[in-house]
Amino acid sequence: MSLTRTQQVQTNGSSATISKSRFLPVFCAAIAVGIFIADTITPTEFAFGVLYVGVVLLAARFLQWRGVVLVTLGCMVLAVLSYLLSQHYVSPGLAVANRLLSLAVIGVAGFLAVQGQSRELVLREQAGLLDLTHDTIFVRDRDDVIVYWNRGAEELYGWKKAEAVGKVTHQLLQTVFPMPLEEITAELLRAGRWQGELVHTKKDGTAAIVASRWSLQRDARGHSFAILETNNDITERKRVEDLTGQVFESSPDGISVIGRDYRFQRVNPVYERIWQMPADRLVGQHVGDLLGTKFFEQEAKSYLDRCFAGESVSFEGWFAHPAGRRYRIMTYSPLRLHSGQVEAALAIIHDLTEHMLASEALHAAQTELAHVNRVTTMGQLTASIAHEVKQPIAAVVTNADAALNWLGAQPPNLDRVREILGQIADDGNRAGQVFDRIRALVKKAPPRKNRFDLNEAILEVIALARSEVLKHDVSLQTGLATGLPAADGDRVQLQQVILNLILNAVDAMRGLGEGARELLISTEADAAGGVLVTVRDSGMGLDPNDADRVFEAFYTTKPEGLGMGLAICRSIVAAHGGQMWASANKPRGAVFQFTLPPESDETARAEPTGGGLVV
């Protein structure tokens, strides 16, 4: 857009105002009549008819192109009519030549007027299109004086067109440049364009950050005469970027951006502290150079490749770092541009070392407490254990006496002695199994997760507590479902839970004066595919308001109790991924239930195979 055309567009408003005036048509007609009279009474050697050109040009100010054509034809008719009515004092040839010249000049003026109107209409339409855009567009001359100001500029900055046109751009907008203006001007003159971010001040005093593009306009001889400036308001985007940058820099986690070439593009201060290396050394460094080629190829590269394919990847574990062995959660998230292609990976390291150390210490304390609880429970079963052991030992003694008698017979009955010795071996094994079960429960050992038959483990506990149950006239029944999935966990700890629940049920029914003392232990598959274990008694019952309090530490309803048994039981079940709860039984008694989840699928989760470095 040239400066002349821009000025024409700027005068559209005034042209429209003049065209609406009733004075111009009358004035134009009066001039035409005056020229006709003067041309008629003037000798034909004077080409007075060329003055009709003024009428045509004046008509172009308020008529459309069709009206201009009609006025042009009308002026030509008046010129011919004047020729016919005027006196010819010179040769006819000269008079005709003058008249033809006048007609030609009138025709050329009409053509140029119509053509000018067409160009002006195009410019109006183009200026209207510029007013439709949301971007700010204005044109300034070589002295930075505004000569065009679109509607987008009015909306963004607050100044109307009449207020902005004629003002110096950088004074009006108080422009803040990213570099000296002289350097920007030199780049504009050299390349013909410049783009960058500017800070402008609006009419209300607020600042606006814009992405600015300048285009230099040159004339046919290559001389610059105007600058077209297009600005896009990015204030909100810059604010969000600043906030994002603050999050990046002030995050308590280590954050880095890794490009598709496996090189660091940006790191935050926490990341610098993790690696004890400044950002200028980390940025541009290959991940393999930091971690070591072997660990990069075997571990990190596969995670990054999955991230570059569009997948969010996370893993956790103990890793070696310059600051020592640390437990960290690592996540790789894909970063996409407008094209949708993953351009980089956002790597976040969350340090959970202190949490894991505290968790391990708590787990060790819980394990120790559970062991103490098992030993205490074994103390409660002393009489029952003695009875269980006494039976096979007594049988061994009896069978040994019988064997001696058979050996003393004449002749000795060796077949009978052999049979009795087999019975002695069976009784000895039965006593040994009792001791093995006791030792397993009392032994202090770290938790071990194995797959085992839960029904079989329950039956072993029932055998251990059988004498205690019979001693208090309790009828114990089982309803163990067949085809249950194998339990996944620590067999001894889960047996401790069953044993605690059985002994609590026996204690609850021990004080009953009348009524049946019944204890039912059942297993079944739950809706989630795991196992539901239920221990149901007909004891004193359970207050519904205390159904959850019974699992609190040191809460007990027994004078001699510590209130730790059920709390430990619930923590054991929770550690196995299950839940434990209590409710009242009908018509009396209590029901304790817990679930064990199905075997978890660990294949979906990415886990590091070693304890190497991690980014």
Image: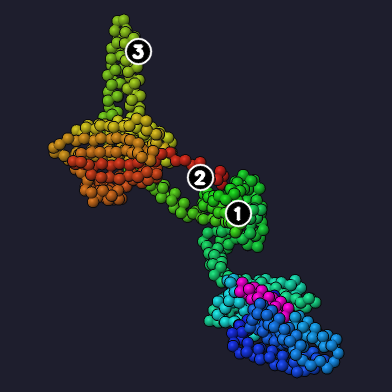
Q: Which residue is tagged 1?
A: 342
- In this orientation, which residue lies closer to the viewer: 247 or 126? 126
Q: What element carries label 1?
A: strand
Residue count near mark 3 (Cα–Cα under 10 Å), binned few <14, some 14–19, many ≥20: few
**Magenta region:** 110-129
Indicate the quadrant where residue 42 lies: bottom right
Q: Position of residue 353 (x, y in %)?
A: 49, 53
Is residue 144 located in the magenta-colored stretch of the structure?
A: no
Tell which tag, 1 or 3, sits nearer the viewer: 1
Q: Position of residue 339 (x, y in %)?
A: 61, 57
Is residue 127 located in the magenta-colored stretch of the structure?
A: yes
* Residue with the most extreme top position: 411
Q: Which residue is tagged 2?
A: 605
Pointer 3 or 2: first along the chain? 3
Residue in the picture at 29% in, 28% down:
389
Q: Is residue 269 above or below residue 291?
A: below
Q: In this view, does 371 lie above or below 410?
A: below
Q: Position of residue 439 (x, y in %)?
A: 36, 34
594 sits to left or right of 239: left
Residue in the picture at 54% in, 53% down:
331
Q: Which residue is tagged 3?
A: 418
Mark 2 in CB contact with mark 1 (< 8 angstroms): no
**Mark 3 to mark 2 CA distance (whole Å):** 59 Å
Q: Is residue 76 something one can see in this rendering?
A: yes
Type of amino acid under label 2: Arg
